[in-house]
């Protein structure tokens, strides 16, 4: 690599032999190499504007793939320019695939010349040049075709204008392509075991397809974790590669023609989940305080009541923070049927509902007034028992005897 000062003594020409592509470059003072005094975007053969640098020795670093090249040079003249006093910078979508960038300098009518304009991801930093999605020499006021951004792993971007070796940042802007044609697209997901996600894609209520799908983390650099091809309504996505990752919320990106839509979903990579297999998310309780009656309903991942599901067993235990639950009584009721909690003492309890090998619980409060003539159940009539899970079966332990959930005697 060679560097040569141009005739104006403020332009440095960079020459890099071979066909290496420069990923990033920066200049530091030879006496203090801990701070970058200029970050540049030049390629081999380009000039670098070093007018902002004071007289002295400097080190020029060029990163090309896994190779880092260092070259020392001497600047003879002092700094002759200063950073611009920028009044405003603005980037906005003016047409479906067209961006317009503007920059104004305080006290001047004409716009400054932009050496290079980058479009980067919202979370871009100079330490992560791989997030530069587009480079252009467009000037303020020009229309910029941003279709190359379509399908990138994020939809919020910023413009970085390089002027006299200094970077000036615009506001962020969103770009997801032309989506008016696909405004009726609806997407939701259903988790199934083992670690699969079922896609439900409809367009105006009819099954639809997406040209491509990819999954990224929700925060940080939006790195692509899973990439796929064309998907259609009812397809499944294997989430096994996500098991063990720190995140539990992800983004699914779907491309429809010239439109990219993004959706959020949760996945914690847990072991086989029997409730997930049955489509059960939680148990919902409705309380009738006047009649001292509760009803329960099983709900799916869309938080809707599951219709027609048979419950194998249900029971009530005591509930309290950091307290071991004790079995209170069985519940002989299917979803939607009344459960009389009149015999329960005032306090907090937990309802357990089991279907197959799936057990879901929900705490509730029994709260009745003595003035209503309700008689508390004597303390000595409350059963003292605990429940344990043995060989995938709930066992009730009362004293030295054990029972199944249906009340039959058994042994551990």
Image: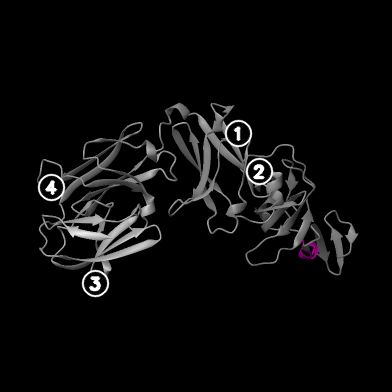
Q: Which residue is mark 4?
A: 106
User: Which badge, 1 or 3, is on the more N-terminal residue?
Assistant: 3
Q: Residue at point 58% right, 53% down? A: 242
Of the pair 165 and 250, the residue shown nearer to us: 165
Residue 348, how many percent across, how many down?
66, 58
Q: Give above or below for 168 relative to 136.
A: below
Mark nearer the viewer, 2 or 4? 4
Query: Are the two marked residues, 3 and 2, in contact with CB atoms closer than 8 angstroms?
Result: no
**Residue count near mark 2 (Cα–Cα under 10 Å), binned few <14, some 14–19, many ≥20:** some
User: Is 208 on the left or on the right of 17, as rendered?
Assistant: right
Q: For the image shown, how many numbered marks are present on the structure?
A: 4
Percent of width and height locating residue 74: 17, 66
Q: Earlier in the sequence, mark 2 or mark 1?
A: 1
User: Residue 133, can we see it?
Assistant: yes
**Which residue does the numbered mark 3 point to in the structure image?**
32
The alpha-carbon separation of the residues under discs 1 and 3 comes to: 59 Å
In this picture, is 107 found above or below 177? below
Q: Nearer the viewer, mark 1 or mark 3?
A: 3
Residue under label 2: 299
The residue that disc 1 covers is: 233
Tell me if residue 238 is in the magenta stretch: no
Closer to us: 190 or 374: 190
């Amino acid at each position: 690599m060679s560097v040569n000062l141009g005739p104006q003594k403020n332009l440095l020409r960079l020459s890099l032999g071979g066909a290496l592509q420069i990923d990033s470059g920066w200049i530091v003072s030879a006496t203090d190499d801990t701070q970058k005094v200029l970050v540049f975007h030049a390629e081999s053969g380009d000039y670098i504007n070093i007018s902002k640098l004071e007289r002295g020795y400097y080190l020029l670093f060029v990163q090309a793939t896994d190779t880092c090249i260092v070259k020392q040079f001497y600047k003879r003249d002092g700094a002759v320019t200063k950073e611009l006093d920028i009044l405003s910078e603005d980037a906005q979508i003016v047409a479906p695939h067209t961006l317009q960038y503007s920059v104004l300098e305080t006290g001047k009518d004409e716009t400054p010349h932009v050496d290079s304009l980058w479009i980067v991801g919202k979370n871009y930093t100079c330490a992560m040049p791989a997030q530069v999605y587009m480079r252009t020499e467009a000037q303020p006021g020009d229309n910029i075709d941003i279709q190359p951004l379509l399908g990138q792993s994020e939809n919020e971007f910023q413009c970085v204008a390089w002027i006299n070796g200094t970077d000036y940042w615009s506001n962020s802007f969103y770009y997801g392509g032309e989506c008016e044609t696909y405004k009726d697209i609806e997407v939701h997901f259903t988790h199934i075991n083992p670690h699969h996600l079922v896609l439900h894609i409809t367009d105006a209520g009819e099954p639809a397809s997406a040209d491509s799908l990819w999954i990224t983390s929700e925060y940080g650099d939006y790195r692509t974790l899973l990439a796929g091809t064309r998907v259609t309504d009812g397809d499944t996505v294997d989430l096994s590669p996500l098991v063990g990752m720190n995140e539990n919320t992800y983004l699914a990106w779907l491309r429809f023609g010239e439109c990219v839509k993004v959706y959020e979903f949760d996945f914690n990579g847990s072991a086989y989940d029997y409730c997930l297999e049955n489509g059960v998310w939680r148990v919902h309780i409705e309380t009738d305080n006047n009649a001292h009656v509760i009803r329960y309903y099983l709900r799916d991942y869309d938080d809707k009541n599951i219709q027609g599901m048979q419950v194998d067993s249900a029971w009530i235990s005591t509930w309290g923070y950091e307290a071991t639950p004790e079995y209170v009584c069985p519940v002989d009721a299917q979803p939607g049927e009344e459960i009389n909690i009149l015999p329960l003492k005032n306090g907090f309890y937990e309802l357990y509902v089991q279907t197959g090998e799936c057990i879901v619980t929900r705490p509730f409060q029994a709260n009745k007034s003595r003035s209503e003539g309700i008689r508390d159940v004597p303390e000595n009539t409350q059963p003292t028992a605990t429940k344990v899970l043995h060989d995938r079966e709930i066992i009730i332990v009362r004293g030295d005897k054990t029972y199944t959930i249906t009340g039959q005697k058994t042994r551990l």
